[in-house]
Image: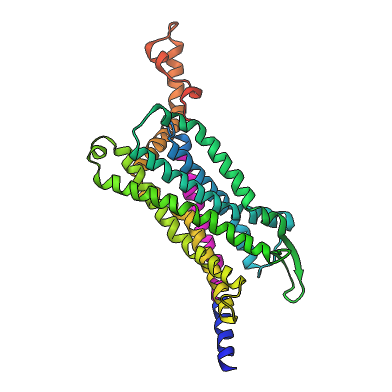
Amino acid sequence: MEAAAELVCNHTAAWDWLYAMQPAYMSVICLLGLVGNSCVLCVFCLQKRRRSVADIYLSNLAAADLLMLCCLPFWVDTILNKFHWRFGETMCRLINSVIGSNYYCSVLFLTLVSVDRYLALTRPLSQGRRRRAVWARGICLGIWVAGVLFSFPALLFRSVRFFPDLDIDACFLDYPHAGWRLRYNVTVSTVGFLVPVPIVSFCSFHISRALRSSRRMRAGGGVERKAARLVLAVLAVFALCWLPYQLIVFLDTLDHYEVLSGCTWSYVLDIGNQLATYLGYSNCSLNPFLYVIVGKHFRQKAREVFSLALRRRRRPWATPLHSHANLNSTRPTESTQMTPHPTQDGNSC
C-alpha cells in the first residue's frame, strides 16, 4: 500500500509539474517559431533567383510548421483554463487535424528534400533536373492532401463533452473502439518511421560521403554542398525531436496488446507522451535557426531580400526628383528607359 501511494504521489507531482510548465514552454516555441518561419517564407518567396526544388520543399516545410504553430495558442488558452475548451466542436476538430497533419507533412517534405540533395550531389545536372522544379509543386500539393487524409481520424472522432466531475468542456479524442488506437499507432510508425527512415538514411549516407570525398564539388559545386549540409542538419534535428515520440508510440502498441501492463507503465506512457509531444513541437521553431546557423547560402538569400526591401522603401522618396527631371525633357533619356517598372521586377512568389 505504501509503494502504491508513493507511486500515485509521484505521478501526481509529475503531472503538476507538466501542467505548470506547458503554457510557458508552448508560448516560447510558438513565438519563436511564428517569427522564424515567417521570415523563412519571406526569404524563399521574395528571392530574385528562381527557386530550386530544395527551396520549394523547404518553403512548404516552413508553411506546415507555421500552420501548426498558429494552432498552439488555442491549447495554451485551454491549459490555462484547466483544459476547458472554449472554441466549439468545429474548432476542436479543425485545430487538432492541422496539428496532426503537420507531422506527416514534415516527414514527407524532409524525405523529398533528402532525395533531391542525393540526386543533386550524386547525379550530373541535366535539363530534366530543371524541369523537376515545375512538377515539384504538384508533389507538394499531393503531400498536403496526404497529410489531411492521415489526420482524418481527428476530424471524425474529436469532440467536445462536458465532464461534471471536472466542471469543464473538454476537447478530447473519443475513438469508437480500441482498434482505432492501434490503427493510429501503425500509421504513425509506418509513415513517420518505417518508410522514410531507410530512404533518408540511404540518402544522408551518400550525401555525407560526397561531402567528404568530392574534390570536384569543393571546386565547382559550393552551392550544392552548402544546401546539402543544411539538409543534413535539418534531418538530424527532426530525428532527435521526434524519435522519442516514435518510441512512446511503440510502447503504447505493446501496452495495447498487454505485452507491457500495469499501473507503472500507464504512468510512464502518460508522462512520456506529454514530454515527447512537446519535444516534437519544438522542432517547428528550431528549423529557421538552422537555416541561419548552418545555411550560408540561405543567409546570402536573406541579405538579398532584406536589401531589396530597404531599396523599395527608399524608392518613393526618390520618385518626386525623377518626376521633376522628366518634366524638363520631352524625350525619354537613357536613365528613364532603364528604370524597371515596379510590377516587372519578378520578385513575387
SS assignment for the magenta stretch, majority: helix
Residue 87 appears anywhere in the view: no
Q: Is residue 12 left or right of residue 331?
A: right
* Colour scheme shown: rainbow
Q: Is residue 59 magenta?
A: no
Magenta range is: 16-43
- Say if the magenta span includes residue 34: yes
Quarter of the image where the N terminus is located:
bottom right
| Snapshot quadrant of residue 318 | top left
Q: Residue 72 at x, y = what percent?
A: 58, 57
Q: Residue furthest bottom?
A: 2
Asked whether residue 340 appears in the rendered view, the answer is yes
Residue at 29 percent across and 38 percent down: it is: 222
The image shows residue 82, relative to residue 281, as above or below, that is below
Q: How many marks?
A: 0
289, 252: nearer the viewer: 252
Residue 161: x and y in percent read 76, 66
The answer to whether 145 is drawn above or below residue 239 in the figure is above
**Residue at the location (43% across, 40% down)?**
54
Residue 190 at x, y = what percent? 54, 56
Residue 4: x percent and y percent?
58, 89
* x 42%, y 50%: residue: 200
- The quarter of the picture where residue 236 lies is bottom left
Reply above or below: 81 against 55. below
Pick the front one: 218 or 204: 204
Q: Nearer the viewer, residue 39 or 67?
A: 67
Report whether 62 appears left or right of 186: left
Residue 20 vertical placement versus 43 (above, below)? below
* Residue name at image x 57 percent, y 75 percent: 259
As drawn, the residue found furthest toward the top would be 330
